[in-house]
Amino acid sequence: MAKQKKNKRTKKEEEPLIFEWNEYHQRFQSRYISQTYNVELDDETLRDGLQSPSVKDPTIEEKLRIVHLMEKLGIHAADIGLPASGPRAKADITRIAQEIFDNKMKIRPNCAVRTLVDDIKPLLEISEKVGYPIEAAMFIGSSPIRIYAEEWSINKMLRLTEEAVDFAVKHGIPVMYVTEDTTRAHPRTIKRLYTTAIEHGAERICVCDTVGYANPLGVYYLLRFIMKMVNSLDRNIKVDWHGHSDRGLAIPNTMAAISSGVNRVHATALGIGERVGNTQMDQLLINLKLEGIIKTDLRKLTEYCRTVASAVGFNISPNYPIIGEDAFRTATGVHAAAIIKAERKGDAFMADRIYSGVPAAMVGRRQKIEVGFMSGISNIVYWLKKRGIKPEEHLVEEIFKAAKARDRVLTEDEIMQIVKYSSGGEIQVKKDSLKSWDKGIKFNKKNVSLKPSTGKSLQKSKSTRAKSKKAVKAKMTKSGALRNR
Ligand SMILES: [Zn+2]
């Protein structure tokens, strides 16, 4: 009864467990922020992603698997390659487009082409072969620095735009007109290029931060300018945003683009792409879900990222958000203690959020507590209990000593070796093997016993038990470090 009373939250406490500063703008009903976020996603992993200088080109089987995972994650469109880049690209694009058609997938393919008739021709051939039109992501440079280096003239660019858009439209290919480096382009140039493309039949325009130059406010103002221009044409033109990570601002920029009211945003798995890459699709999906913009089940997200990583030969860094090994893992006493307390209240929701901005369950993962030099007793007790091992005091003490003597987190094997050794005759572990990794531990094999898994303690002398108990208790009450610091 007493326990129940303790766990019950008072009326004052019955406010939300998390105060939502992130959604505060909705309370203010800001006229500057779009209230309708019907944003779609275009996956660039198989085009821009493969332009990363560090990737290998995945096999066609791997590419098909990746497209199926995109479909499962509710991604609306995918750039499936550059048809003009060679016969293998063309064959792969054809196979992927066929797979999408045969499986009646919802995902819509598009292909990158330069604003040249000769680039559109191979796309047209593929479209005719698979029996449905594939959208052309027709790109052209737009910034003064690029125009100057290429020695282009605006009139030449407008003429190329007219020819290429006319050719695609005449053959039933939908056009997304993509201006590269839009975030450094002059508004006059942007307006002339987009207006020409739209007048000649482009259904969609794409604003690009090709070199990762923009900041969120810049994105917001640029897109407000473009949205205003597009709306004045009254043609129901869609607007895309395509961002890069050079300044580490890809996600905030993409969120700013969504707030500006764009219809679709581009991203790649793990952010792979040119130089340091694109907007990270995985991080974007999580942010959209946390903001309530999408309702998609994201439990396939880890598989999607790991499949792409394996297909392109990338290692996922342990501290990579959401997907990395350490995303939901802690060895720190104060963090572990808070998670354990939340779990003890029988509140999985709280335990998954108390020290995590992203709940692990959202992506089919779980919080993991490790034992290391920053750990407290609670880490060890929790670790043992999770594995069905009774946390006898002497055992906890021995693991604690080992953890403090190390300069990193103990591995599962290392902790299990201590457990096995402490179990006396139950499981034979050579003392030498323990000595080799920790000289600081004093093993008292004689009187120590613990039966792993059953949680049932074996015989142990009273004196040893009392000694261990005293030592652990002293540590738990005396040391601030043990109390989660
Ligand atoms: Zn790009």
Image (cartoon, helix red, strand yellow):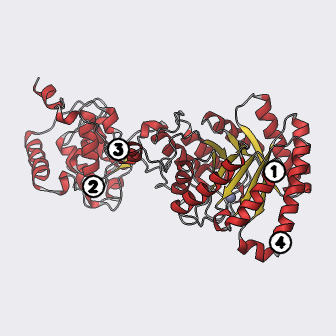
- The residue tagged 2 is 402
Per the model, the C-alpha gap separating discs 4 and 1 is 20 Å
Which label is found at residue 20?
3
The amino acid on which the numbered mark 4 sits, given as a three-letter code, is Ser
Q: Are marks 1 and 2 in contact (CB under 8 Å)?
A: no
Secondary structure at numbered mark 3: loop
**Between tags 3 and 1, which lies in front?**
1
Q: Are marks 4 and 1 in contact (CB under 8 Å)?
A: no
Which quarter of the rendered picture does the N terminus lie within? top left
- The residue tagged 1 is 199
Q: Is residue 475 placed above or below 183 in the rendered structure?
A: above
Q: Earlier in the sequence, mark 4 or mark 1?
A: 4
**Between tags 4 and 1, which lies in front?**
1
Mark 4 crowdedness (10 Å alpha carbons): few <14, some 14-19, many ≥20: few
**Between tags 1 and 2, which lies in front?**
1
- The residue tagged 4 is 153
Secondary structure at numbered mark 2: helix
